[in-house]
Amino acid sequence: MIFTTLTLSQMGHVLSIRSSRGSLFKSGLFSNNALLGAVLLTFILQMAVVYVPFLQVIFKTVTLPPVDPLISLVLSTVVFWVVELEKWFLRQRL
């Protein structure tokens, strides 16, 4: 579960640091399709490593119970929100 949480938090982080001052909500999620594609591909590969049996053997992972990915997703958004909050504070000071 930690592996999944860390991977997802890095995906949130990369989306939030696209701009040093502007919010992702203002610039739009679809303004950088290559980055969005990379994030989606990483998410798919992460889920494959956790749920595809032959990849579980290679990466020594186990299937997560249904609630664990949701917990990972919620916990991984902390990084995103902290960066967005920091940028909001920077915009307020300027």
Image (cartoon, grey):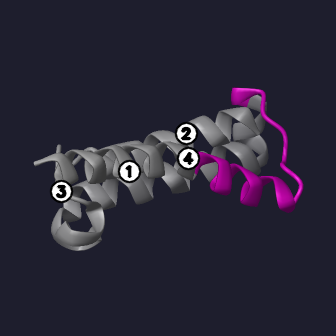
Q: Answer whether labels 2 and 1 touch (C-beta < 8 Å).
A: no
* The label number, if any, that marks residue 22 in the structure image: 3
The correct choice, above or below, for 26 with respect to 82 in the image is below
Q: Report the side of 68 relative to 89 (left or right).
A: right
Of labels 3 and 1, the one closer to you? 1
- Magenta residues, start to end: 58-76
Mark 1: which amino acid? Leu
Q: Going from the N terminus, do you reach mark 2 or mark 1 first?
A: 2
Which residue is drawn at the image coordinates 26% and 54% (left, top)?
35
User: In this orientation, does residue 3 appear?
Assistant: yes
84 lies above or below 32: above
**Badges 4 and 3: C-beta atoms under 8 Å apart?**
no
Mark number, residue 78: 4
On the image, the x and y values in percent for residue 16 come to: 32, 50
Q: Which callout, 3 or 2, points at the residue further toward the start of the chain?
A: 2
* Front position in the image: 68 or 63: 68
Q: CA distance from mark 4 to mark 2?
A: 13 Å
Q: Residues within 10 Å of mark 4 (few under 14, many from 20)?
A: some
